[in-house]
Image (cartoon, rainbow, N blue to C red):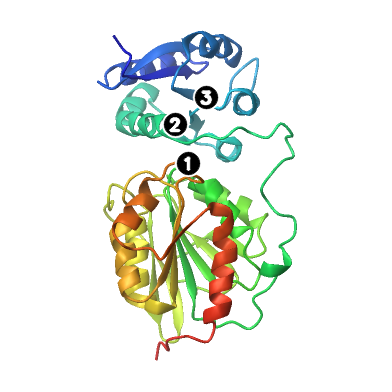
């Protein structure tokens, strides 16, 4: 009897990949593969008949593109979807589009040795299926043009005017965080303080992600480069597979991008970024914990608060997964818990109120 197991339908045009994913899923004591479809049209019938808890969906397939299928699914019958992506430039762009449309997360197919590669990724795949099964998914608006991106900032956040360049905003995010971070950044004015972001993403995706955000935001968004000066009006995203932190160099802040062991099983890790914020930036820091599974960054966010930072957590209703904000709140790390759409305006309000309360770095 599988009533207590996570029921998964695998959708992939490769018979080899379907078989491997089904094998990996069925080996887990808490999940089972209830169906495997070679294309979205077959999958549509399976979903209707089998009522799965989670779907794994190939990005590129015959008869109907995975993105087209996802868009229809999230509009008509929203449910947790984990995308299976190819490690190519097009695969990266399509995967980011899938996250925008409501996919919970993604895994990357290995470039070579598909069988061995997928087996090695088994822990990652099954962890993301578990997370997806608990995720909060939302119905996609019926209009494909509908979006939360504001074409112009409201007057209340149009500009910060004269503001100390000492302040830095630090953001940590994981599952669901690509779109939550976008929502926050597009609503920051061009003269925002610098923003440093650790989003759990694998190598190969963060450059495309940063470029996408750069095209939407008033501030400049890019992958962080080791040793570069951290400037107002810029956002710096931790490259996939590397840790991001902040250091001081004379009168300036600089980004430090380094390899190292995973922290809390993650690389990049929010813990690494937030620890450096507490140590180097202190009360000139603002911390934001967005949607994500697990506890990465919760302890370090408390250290930030103890060092004088002002911290905000995303609320449960607007999170895809409330794990990371919940843990930050449990650690006593936060001052406020807010819906996603209220975080950027609140940051701007706080900065205006506290623009004169700057601690010198000298």
Q: Determine crowd level at label 1: few under 14, some 14-19, many 20+ residues with C-alpha closer than 10 A.
A: many
- The label shown at residue 212 is none
Asked if labels 3 and 2 touch by Cβ distance under 8 angstroms, the answer is no
Q: Nearer the viewer, residue 327 or 196?
A: 327
Quadrant assignment, res 188: bottom right
Where 73 falls versus 208 (above or below)? above
Q: Does residue 204 appear left or right of residue 130 in this picture? A: right
Where 282 falls versus 200 (above or below)? below
Give the CA separation, mark 1 to mark 2. Answer: 29 Å
Give the CA separation, mark 3 to mark 1. Answer: 21 Å
Query: Mark 1 sits on what residue?
Result: 320
Indicate the position of residue 16 as horizontal and vertical percent values: 42, 14
Nearer mark to the viewer, of 1 and 2: 1
Nearer mark to the viewer, of 3 and 1: 1
- Which label's residue is closer to the chain start, 2 or 3? 3
Quadrant assignment, res 134: top left
- Which label's residue is closer to the chain start, 3 or 1? 3
Residue at 65% of width from left, 18% of height from top? Answer: 64
Indicate the position of residue 132 as horizontal and vertical percent values: 42, 32
Judging from the image, what secondary structure is the residue with disc 3 in?
strand
Query: Mark 2 sits on what residue?
Result: 111
Indicate the position of residue 62 as horizontal and vertical percent values: 62, 16
Where 318 falls versus 80 (above or below)? below
Quadrant assignment, res 94: top right
Where 360 falls versus 295 (above or below)? below
Indicate the position of residue 261 as horizontal and vertical percent values: 26, 53
Q: Determine crowd level at label 2: few under 14, some 14-19, many 20+ residues with C-alpha closer than 10 A.
A: few
Image quadrant in which the N terminus is located: top left
Residue at 74% of width from left, 34% of height from top? Answer: 143
- The label shown at residue 58 is 3
Residue at 53% of width from left, 50% of height from top? Answer: 180
- Which label's residue is closer to the chain start, 1 or 2? 2
């Amino acid at each position: 009897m599988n009533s207590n197991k996570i029921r998964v339908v695998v959708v992939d045009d490769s018979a080899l990949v379907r078989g491997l994913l089904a094998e990996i899923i069925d080996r887990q004591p808490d999940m089972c593969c209830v169906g495997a479809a070679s294309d979205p049209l077959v999958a549509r019938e399976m979903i209707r008949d089998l009522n799965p808890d989670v779907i794994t969906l190939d990005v590129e397939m015959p008869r109907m593109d995975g993105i087209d299928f996802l868009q229809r699914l999230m509009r008509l019958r929203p449910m947790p979807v984990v995308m299976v992506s190819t490690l190519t430039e097009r695969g990266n762009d399509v995967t980011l589009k899938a996250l925008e449309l409501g996919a919970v997360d993604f895994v990357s197919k290995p470039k070579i040795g598909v069988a061995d590669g997928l087996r090695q990724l088994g822990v990652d795949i099954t962890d993301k299926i578990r997370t997806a099964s608990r995720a909060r998914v939302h119905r996609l608006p019926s209009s494909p043009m509908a979006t939360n991106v504001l074409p112009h900032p409201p007057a209340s956040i149009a500009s910060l005017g004269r503001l100390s360049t000492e302040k830095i905003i630090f953001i940590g995010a994981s599952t669901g965080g690509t779109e939550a971070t976008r929502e926050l950044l597009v609503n920051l004015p061009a003269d925002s303080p610098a923003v440093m972001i650790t989003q759990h993403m694998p190598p190969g995706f963060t450059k495309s992600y940063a470029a996408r955000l750069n095209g939407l935001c008033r501030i400049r968004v890019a992958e962080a480069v080791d040793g570069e000066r951290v400037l107002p009006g810029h956002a710096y995203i931790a490259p996939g597979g590397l840790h991001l932190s902040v250091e001081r160099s004379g009168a300036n802040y600089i980004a430090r991008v380094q390899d190292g062991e995973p922290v809390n099983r993650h690389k990049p890790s929010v813990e690494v970024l937030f620890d450096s914020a507490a140590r180097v930036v202190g009360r000139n820091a603002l911390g934001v914990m967005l949607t994500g599974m697990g506890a990465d960054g919760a302890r370090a966010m408390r250290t930030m608060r103890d060092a004088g930072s002002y911290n905000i957590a995303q609320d449960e209703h607007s999170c895809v997964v409330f794990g990371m904000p919940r843990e930050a709140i449990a650690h006593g790390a936060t001052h406020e818990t807010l819906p996603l759409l209220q975080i950027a305006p609140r940051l701007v309000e706080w900065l205006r109120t506290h623009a004169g309360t700057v601690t010198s770095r000298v």
